[in-house]
Image: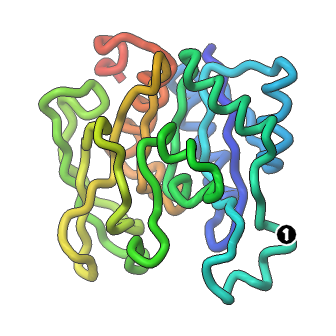
Amino acid sequence: MASNLILTGGIFHPFETAAPALAELLSEVGIDSVVRWDVDEALAEMADGAAYDLVTVYALRWRMLDHEKYEPYRAEWAMSLSSAARTALSAHVRSGGGLLGLHTATICFDDWPEWPELLGGRWVWGRSHHPPVGPVQVRLDTRGHPLTRGLDDFSLQDEVYHHLDMVPDAVALATADNPEGEGPQTVIWAHTVDSGRVVYDALGHDAAALRAPVHSRILQRAAAWATGRSDKQVEAI
């Protein structure tokens, strides 16, 4: 089985149930996951030799300096990645390891300039936002990428992130809209960094959103593609 490190934890999201749900989904396609809440420690261990085929960032960990409402949570959840952790994650991707970012991953590691380059985009404070959890319609671009080829559009209950930045080479694979939104927003993209494959999926507020029909298959395909499986193998999922 391929190995996967799921980095999780943070405020305002039920990561304690969602991260294990993700691990269970990926186990169905031959990916064995370890869930870690100490993000910096887990990445620093990679610098000391711990190796994974895939690193999944499904967390909300940043410096939390952007609004006074975060002040009560800073002591427990605010973080800045250590130099060792940054080096390990960058080396993992650039040497051919897979990276899967989910939902709040674009908010993470806000003082690390390389992170948006690796992930393929970022949350922009003062511009990016999301309406409350509600009904979401997702439309797929099924023309050119194995993550979405042959799949149908779908709906789920989730948040739609608005106005994220994307790097120029990221390939948009899905847009989403909800009644309280501002029109379709790109919510899934893929790109490569050197020899590493990267997928970001802005959906996935909770376990139910991860398990939603079609979305669960996209997540499984994303992990399989990021770990180097062929297009044919990915599309068979």
Judge by depth and name the residue closer to the eye, 22 or 161.
Answer: 161
Q: Is 215 rendered above or below residue 197?
A: below
Q: Residue at 29% across / 21% down in the picture?
A: 235
Judge by depth and name the residue closer to the eye, 169 or 162.
Answer: 169
Q: Is 175 rendered above or below residue 234?
A: below
Q: Residue at 70% across / 44% down in the picture?
A: 7
Quarter of the image that includes the N terminus? top right
Return the x and y of residue 228 as percentages of the image width and height: 46, 14
Judge by depth and name the residue closer to the eye, 13 or 167.
Answer: 167
- Quarter-wise, where is residue 51 in the image? top right
Return the x and y of residue 66 as percentages of the image width and height: 61, 78
Q: Taking the image as drawn, is residue 79 in sight?
A: yes
Q: Taking the image as drawn, is residue 208 in sight?
A: no
| Secondary structure of residue under mark 1 | helix
User: Neighbour class for label 1 at 10 Å: few (<14), some, many (≥20)?
Assistant: few
Judge by depth and name the residue closer to the eye, 36 or 21.
Answer: 36
Return the x and y of residue 72 as percentages of the image width and height: 79, 84
Q: Residue at 34% across / 46% down in the picture?
A: 188
Give, as a three-letter code, the residue at label 1.
Glu
In the picture as drawn, the residue positioned furthest to the front comes out as 113
Return the x and y of residue 196 as percentages of the image width and height: 49, 21
Quarter of the image that includes the C terminus? top left
The image shows a total of numbered marks equal to: 1
- Quarter-wise, where is residue 190 in the image? top left
Q: Residue at 72% across / 57% down in the picture?
A: 9
Q: Is residue 201 left or right of residue 17?
A: left
In the picture as drawn, the residue positioned furthest to the left comes out as 143
**Residue matched to label 1:** 76
**How does the figure colour the protein chain or chains?**
rainbow
- Quarter-wise, where is residue 192 in the image? top left
Q: Is residue 112 left or right of residue 162?
A: right
